[in-house]
Amino acid sequence: MSVNVIVGTQWGDEGKGKITDLLAKKVDLVVRYQGGNNAGHTVVINKKTFKLHLIPSGIFYPHIICVIGNGVVIDPEVFLQEVATLKDNGINVSPKNLKISKTAHVILSKHKERDCNNEEAKDSLKIGTTKRGIGPSYEDKINRSGLRAEQYAKELEPYLVDSVLYLDKAIKDNKNILLEGAQGTMLDIDHGTYPFVTSSNPTAGGSCTGSGIGPTKIDKVIGIAKAYCTRVGEGPFPTELNDSIGIYLREKGAEYGTTTGRNRRCGWFDIPVLKHAVRVNGLTELVITKLDVLDDLDEIQICTGYNYKGNILKDYPSDINVLIECIPVLKSFPGWNSDITEISSYSDLPKETQNYLNFIEQETGVPIRIVSVGADRTQTVWK
Ligand code: IMP
Ligand code: MG
């Protein structure tokens, strides 16, 4: 029996969908614990691309039961649409393999309207939300005036369960459970770049409150990090590249928002950010994704610290006013200038690629378990 958590260590879009799908092969249940359809999880199977916003990424395996936990906010329309689209593509989806927590809150049209209006009204605090009504729905939840799924639509009813009892029984039956985070550590309402964050806790602690599984039941916390950084929406991003390399990363990495289609901002890998993620999530292992995107670069940089008014900070500062003024200290690595997308064993990776990965391990003290070298399930290197 194991209960493992997958969390994003950056600003979301780290490739959690692919890794969840990959690890799901060996589990019995996949549980989403926060966020809503602001998320966009891309899974590629046999060259076919699926984009999930609400349904857990385990849905493609017939043996898996997917649970939308109490910490998620559900737009019923989007939910039913996603179910229909999956069915149209021959994926088996029914209340047998997909459950919704009765105590998850719903997103209503008033929440979506409020999300859109917010954008225009508070110009000085423009977050660049996905406009899916996520924040306003959580706002009503915290204000104790929200609507829970069990009090809502008839159409949702067949999917509803007491998810806390359901997951407790699964644990007692020795099932393997994967808790799938959405967004990432730097978008966490408590630990991210507040106020430029989402309205939930993507970090590992959120997996307990958002599923009703107690912290003593968690075995591993797996942090997903992209081999470079991206951010969609507003807010500080110390290693952002506003040059031809930034454009190269966006184009080669197809860095466009899955939910909104917006351009993602791109930049170098950031060690202080990753070390922050290691701390607040208690990461036990790392997965590095999209490493192949760096294939054509002659030189690759990693941010090892921040220069703040002449002082070198080795750790990510919690004060956003300090963060805004930080200039990244960059360490240069030679590129590998070769195609790694067909490589399947770690020792076959070029020496330069291994150096890059070793440096990340050394700086964080957390072992890398998996390296992803392409979007398909098969393009995966296990260490
Ligand atoms: P909200 O979650 O729609 O309220 O948006 C708040 C911030 O989080 C915005 O900057 C969004 O672009 C960002 N965001 C929300 N969901 C995701 C995601 O799944 N991936 C990346 N960024 C996200
Ligand atoms: Mg995404």
Image: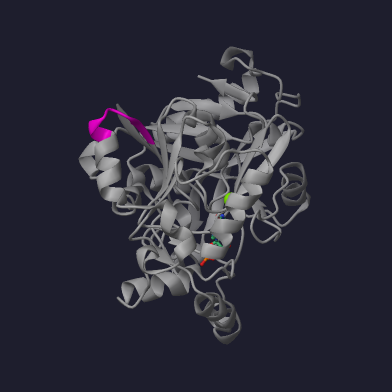
- Quick check: is 103 in the magenta stretch? no
Name the residue nearer the viewer: 75 or 357.
75
Relative to 139, residue 304 above or below: above
- Quick check: is 172 in the magenta stretch? yes
Q: Within the image, what quadrant is residue 297 found in?
A: top right
In percent of width and height, residue 275 lies at 41, 43
In percent of width and height, residue 231 lies at 60, 56
Please give the name of the residue rendered at 29% of the width and 36% of the height, measured from the top-left corner: 170
Q: State which region is magenta.
A: 171-177
In percent of width and height, residue 373 lies at 65, 29
Could you tell me if residue 218 is visible in this image? Answer: no
Q: Within the image, what quadrant is residue 137 found in?
A: bottom left
Does 182 sit left or right of 42 as displayed?
left
In percent of width and height, residue 286 lies at 45, 33
Relative to 116, residue 282 above or below: above
Does 111 sit left or right of 334 as displayed?
left
**Image quadrant containing the N terminus:** top left
Please give the name of the residue rendered at 65% of the width and 50% of the height, measured from the top-left corner: 85
Name the residue nearer the viewer: 10 or 145.
145
Please give the name of the residue rendered at 46% of the width and 75% of the height, measured from the top-left corner: 136
Does 273 sit left or right of 302 as displayed?
left
Could you tell me if residue 247 is visible in this image? Answer: yes
